[in-house]
Image (spheres, rainbow, N blue to C red):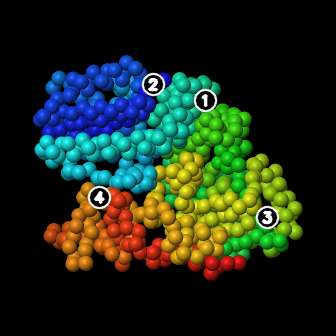
């Protein structure tokens, strides 16, 4: 099996360096091109050996930056200089976002195969963009180190040595993240070998879409990935299923309003569309329906049961059962969709096949609204999302005929209700009726208790004692459980002691202050902040003096610390009014002192200001306790 070499590069006007570490053997190599040495010939020989052995080079955003720079060196090895390498790197960095693919060296042209953790985890998506420094915080690294010198600095020999030391810090952190990504990499390697198609740098969604495209290519004569269905407008009356019917005037008004709409854009097509029944508000949106009771604690009892109903593979099955498809793909699309759905059911959960087929099922809907996708047909998108919401409302309407039934939540693909146990057979008969009408499958679970702030932030305690956490109550990370649904790598893992204390108080009745004061994991007290290169971060001492910090800083709330302040350039509107407008200063955790802890050796347990953490935990707990019912 081919080896994997984790690597990183650094480039300044008078030095280029690259470090590589073999994941299997631990071998390390450093190559430098600077005023003091030229290792380019040895680097080229080394890369030739990797190519010969079929090895991979693995980095973080290496396909977007490191490898194009390396490829430039390979192609110009006889005439490059440290400065020309630096200039080429700056050209990549300064490329506008909409031209970012101009610098990519595609698989077929790569001298050595590349594996990019940045792409695998979909950090190249704007909404998921994540830096290696953020990962260092989330991986609970001993130290969080920023680049030691401003880009463009001409370095002396001592600074060059420190730069190479820093490069190896980044490589070490990349190795750690590589280890945390081994399951995802093995999954992609297995798919690549099985289907003779390169999945190695695909994010999860792209894996699913590519698999679906493979099935279209095999099944559909004349399939063309460039074909799409573009529409000038969509009449929503044309997309609503004929069997959607309501008895309550509130839902009837929503349906009538929708049927009167002709939209030209799917984004924001449904804004401020809602109705209220029995005090429960149903909010309709382009992405799905949602609604929740007021903050509180809801409990089951001998007399009442809390039951949650989800529709199995809701959006895929809406298409399959109702013959919905992007117009340019035809009815065969539904048959392939159903084949994929049935095939997935043959494989156990957590198998490679099951995971890939789940991605194939879920990725298609989202891509149907992407102007860059072969699935693009916005009417298909709206057919799924509009009918998905209305069908759930049909279920809710019939369930609410039970006068003692309480709607707790409704959200995208399911709903949660509390009702008398004596009516359980009737409630289940309503569910069976809905499944017969829609030909969709409902899956149900019961809760002992639900601790709800809103539809996206709550804790649900199942009857077996296991917990479901959402939003502000999540704290389990990929470090704890690679398969967790709580916190992904791109999310903020700050001050997790707050969520843990809130859960301890809600679930087990523990005292918040006592829990926090006795909590032993010091990383759970850490917070992080970052500022762009155009800004700077400073610690302000009691005399008002600024001390500049790293742009990526880890810290904790402390009794004997400094104020944390972000200093930003004036806005365009401020400059228009006053060309000499001062920089803006914004306090972070205003009113509280902080201690910087980029090196965990600087942590002082006795300095932690418990009051802040207690206050934050109480904000998660008290509104719910006050709404107990």
Relative horizontal placement of residue 224, taking residue 152 as reference (left or right)? right
Can residue 222 be seen here? The reply is: yes
Which quadrant of the structure image shows residue 455?
bottom right
User: On residue 2, which mark appears?
Assistant: 2
Relative horizontal placement of residue 121, taking residue 142 as reference (left or right)? right
Identify whether 629 is placed above or below 479: below
User: On residue 551, which mark appears?
Assistant: 4
What x and y, as percent, mark residue 73? Answer: 24, 29
User: On residue 11, which mark appears?
Assistant: none
User: On residue 398, which mark appears?
Assistant: 3
Asked if labels 1 and 2 touch by Cβ distance under 8 angstroms, the answer is no
Q: Earlier in the sequence, mark 1 or mark 3?
A: 1
- How far apart marks 3 and 4 lie (CA) works out to 55 Å
- How far apart marks 1 and 4 lie (CA) works out to 47 Å
Q: Residues within 10 Å of mark 1 (few under 14, many from 20)?
A: some
Q: Nearer the viewer, residue 434 or 227?
A: 434
Identify whether 500 is placed above or below 46: below
Q: Earlier in the sequence, mark 3 or mark 4?
A: 3
Q: Secondary structure at mark 3?
A: helix
* Residue of label 1: 215
Q: Nearer the viewer, mark 2 or mark 1?
A: 2
Q: Nearer the viewer, mark 2 or mark 3?
A: 2
Q: Secondary structure at mark 4?
A: loop
Q: Nearer the viewer, residue 82 or 199?
A: 82
Q: Earlier in the sequence, mark 2 or mark 1?
A: 2
Q: Earlier in the sequence, mark 2 or mark 4?
A: 2
């Amino acid at each position: 099996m081919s080896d994997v070499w984790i690597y990183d590069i650094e480039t300044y006007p008078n030095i280029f360096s690259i470090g590589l570490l073999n994941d299997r053997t631990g071998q390390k190599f450093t190559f430098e091109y600077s005023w003091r040495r030229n290792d380019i010939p040895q680097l080229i020989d080394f890369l030739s050996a990797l190519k010969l052995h079929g090895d991979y080079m693995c980095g973080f955003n290496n396909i977007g930056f490191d490898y194009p720079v390396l490829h430039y060196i390979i192609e110009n090895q006889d005439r490059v200089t440290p400065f020309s390498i630096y200039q080429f790197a700056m050209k990549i960095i300064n490329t506008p976002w909409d031209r970012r693919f101009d610098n990519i060296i595609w698989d077929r042209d790569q001298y050595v195969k590349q594996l990019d953790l940045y792409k695998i985890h979909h950090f190249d998506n704007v909404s998921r963009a994540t830096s290696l420094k953020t990962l260092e915080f989330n991986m609970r690294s001993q130290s969080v180190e920023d680049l030691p010198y401003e880009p463009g600095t001409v370095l002396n020999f001592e600074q060059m040595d420190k730069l190479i030391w820093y490069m190896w810090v980044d490589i070490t952190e990349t190795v750690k993240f590589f280890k945390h990504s081994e399951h995802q990499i093995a999954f992609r390697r297995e798919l690549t070998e099985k289907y003779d198609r390169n999945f190695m740098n695909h994010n999860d969604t792209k894996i699913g879409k590519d698999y679906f495209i493979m099935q279209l290519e095999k099944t559909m004569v004349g399939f063309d990935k460039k074909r799409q269905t573009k529409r000038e407008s969509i009449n929503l009356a044309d997309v609503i299923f004929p069997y959607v019917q309501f008895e309550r005037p509130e839902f009837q008004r929503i349906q009538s309003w929708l049927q009167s709409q002709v939209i030209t854009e799917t984004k924001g097509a449904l804004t401020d569309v809602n109705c209220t029944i029995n005090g429960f508000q149903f909010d309709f949106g382009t992405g799905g329906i949602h609604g929740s009771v007021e903050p509180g604690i809801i409990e089951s009892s001998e007399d009442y049961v809390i039951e949650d109903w989800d529709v199995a593979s809701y959006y895929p099955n809406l298409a399959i059962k109702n013959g919905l498809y992007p117009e340019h793909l035809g009815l065969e699309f539904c048959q392939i969709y159903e084949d994929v759905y049935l095939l997935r059911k043959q494989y156990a959960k957590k198998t490679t096949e099951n995971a890939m087929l789940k991605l194939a099922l879920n990725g298609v809907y989202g891509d149907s609204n992407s102007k860059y996708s072969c699935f693009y047909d916005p009417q298909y998108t709206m057919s799924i999302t509009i009918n998905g919401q209305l069908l759930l409302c049909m279920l809710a309407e019939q369930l609410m005929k039970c006068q003692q039934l309480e709607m707790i939540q409704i959200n995208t693909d399911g709903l949660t209700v509390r009702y008398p146990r004596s009516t359980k057979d009737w409630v289940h008969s309503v569910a069976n009726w809905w499944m017969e009408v829609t030909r969709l499958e409902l899956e149900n679970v019961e809760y002992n208790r639900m601790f709800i702030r809103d539809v996206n932030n709550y804790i649900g305690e199942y009857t077996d004692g296991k917990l479901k956490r959402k939003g502000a109550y999540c704290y389990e990370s990929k470090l704890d459980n690679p398969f967790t649904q709580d916190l992904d790598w791109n999310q903020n893992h700050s001050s997790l002691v707050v969520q843990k204390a809130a859960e301890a108080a809600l679930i087990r009745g523990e005292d918040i202050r006592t829990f926090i004061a006795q909590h032993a994991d010091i990383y759970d007290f850490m917070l992080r902040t970052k500022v762009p290169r155009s800004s700077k971060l400073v610690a302000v001492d009691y005399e008002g003096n600024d001390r500049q910090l790293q742009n990526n800083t880890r810290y904790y709330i402390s009794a004997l610390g400094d104020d944390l302040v972000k200093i930003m350039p004036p806005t365009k509107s401020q400059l228009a009014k006053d060309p000499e407008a001062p920089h803006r200063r914004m306090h972070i955790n205003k009113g509280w002192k902080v201690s910087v802890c980029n090196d965990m050796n600087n942590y002082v347990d006795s300095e932690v200001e418990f009051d802040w953490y207690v206050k934050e935990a109480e904000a998660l707990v008290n509104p719910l306790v006050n709404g107990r019912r």
